[in-house]
Image (tube, rainbow, N blue to C red):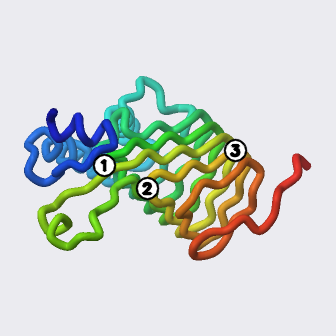
Amino acid sequence: MTEKEKMNAGEWYDPGNDKELVDLRRKAEQLAYDFNNARPHSNEQTNALKELLQKDDVSDISVLAPVYFDYGKSYTRLGKGTFVNHGCYFMDGGTITIGENVFIGPFCGFYTANHPLDRNKRNQGMEIALPIKIGDSCWFGANVSVMPGVTIGSNCVIAAGSVVTSDIPNNSLVAGVPAKVKKTLSEE
């Protein structure tokens, strides 16, 4: 099994010594650089985002520079109507799936990779990447961090500065470090 196959299967893998994974990360880094340094709303910026996210049409999403991805392509999926503000980072080895009409504030991070607690294994560069899933119509305040393996339901509001370490049910207002449900939101 290749390191990429292990990563995709949610198993421990070595991302630093695998040419295929290193090449994919470098390509995403180059495309993000092209996107981040292009004139806003230019054809050059649009084309870089299309290639970065492997989408033929990006007119139904809005992404502001700078933005960063480990892999991009099919590893991060942004739903229709999604808005990504400045300075966001998608550590997407474990895939990040974001629903429709999601608003992501500035400097948010979505982190799928985790490292061993055992220092010897950690020092070998091993990691595991667990998927993040976000439902529809969520709002992330500035500087929110979402940790590996977390699922956030639809219609949630994540307060600025929160660190989401566990799953969040639909219609929740969450805040804190670690983030906790503060209130259930009504449909109104």
Q: Nearer the viewer, residue 153 or 70?
A: 153
Mark 2 or 1: in front is 2
Q: Earlier in the sequence, mark 3 or mark 2?
A: 2
Q: Amino acid at mark 2?
A: Pro
Q: Amino acid at mark 3?
A: Ser
Q: What secondary structure is found at the residue carrying circle 2?
A: loop
Picture quadrant of residue 122: bottom left
Q: Position of residue 69 (x, y in %)?
A: 34, 50
Q: Looking at the image, do the residues carrying marks 2 and 1 touch, with CB atoms under 8 Å apart?
A: no
Q: Is residue 184 above or below residue 11?
A: below
Q: Earlier in the sequence, mark 2 or mark 1?
A: 1
* Label 2, residues with CA under 10 Å away: few <14, some 14-19, many ≥20: many
Q: Nearer the viewer, residue 64 or 94?
A: 94
Q: Nearer the viewer, residue 51 or 69?
A: 69
- Residue annotated with mark 3: 154
Question: Residue 32 shows which numbered tag?
Answer: 1
Give me the residue at 67% from left, 50% from top: 138
Q: Report the label total.
A: 3
